[in-house]
Amino acid sequence: MHKPLMTVVASACALALPAVAYGRTLTLTAQLKNYGGDGAYLAAYLTDAKGAYVRTLWVAGGKAKYYKHLSDWHRLSAADGKRLDGVTGASVGAGRTLQVTAELADALIDAGYEIRLDAAAEDMRDSPSEVRMPLSSQNAGKPQAGRQYIQAVSFQLK
């Protein structure tokens, strides 16, 4: 009787832990400017209060050889072997919108974490940390302007 009870408890914990780890859905929307070039590569990622890399939310752009142009993300995330697992898609054309959804732990919100976006486009200047915005309840829904390729970025929390 002891082993079956342990199996049930272990199974219940395994099912409950993901609910504890991820409590909120973040929807990030980036509207690009009509900058007059090819599709932009974008990296959306989280950093902690000290600016250390936490996790990649999304990378837009299909050719890994160009990821070095997303220089802040590339440098900060280099040691993360899983940085691209399930978080890549096509580049984003000028004037287009990128929308990304990710699951986040409640503990990350209002705790000094920051959403960052790096941007680059072929034959144009790279724009590391083009957008930096605190991951806070207060910033949810408030657009933040980019410096070069991004018109505005906003996020929603559910």
Image: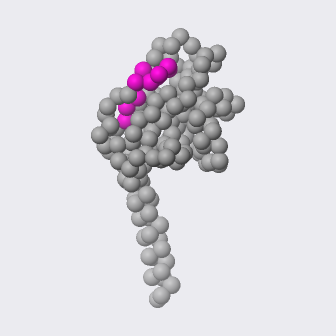
Residue 103 in view (yes/no): no
- Asked whether residue 33 is drawn in magenta, I would say no
User: Which quarter of the rendering shows the C terminus?
Assistant: top left
Residue 107, placed above or below residue 85:
below
Residue name at image x 29 percent, y 40 percent: 138
Above or below for 93 versus 18 = above
Residue placed most toward the observer, 52 or 28: 52
State which quadrant residue 8 falls in. bottom left
Q: How is the image coloured?
A: one colour
Would residue 89 appear left or right of 111 to someone viewing this image? right
Secondary structure mainly formed by the magenta segment: strand
Q: Based on the displayed image, in which of its 4 quarters is residue 127 positioned?
A: top right
Q: Residue furthest front?
A: 50
Residue occupying image coordinates x 60% and y 43%: 77
**Residue at 44% over, 76% down:** 9
Picture coordinates of residue 18 (x, y %)?
44, 59
Q: Which residue in the rendered view is the most extreme toward the left?
A: 138
Residue that protrudes farthest toward the top in the picture: 36
Of all residues shown, which one is farthest toward the bottom?
Answer: 1
How many marks the image carries: the answer is 0
Could you tell me if residue 17 is visible in this image? yes
Q: Position of residue 46 (x, y in %)?
A: 49, 43
Image spot of residue 142 (x, y percent): 32, 31
Q: Position of residue 105 (x, y in %)?
A: 41, 53
**Left or right of residue 141: residue 104:** right
Residue in the image at 46% along x and 17% along y: 33
In depth, the one of 95 and 8 nearer the eye is 95
Q: What stretch of residues is rendered in magenta? A: 145-155
154 inside magenta stretch: yes
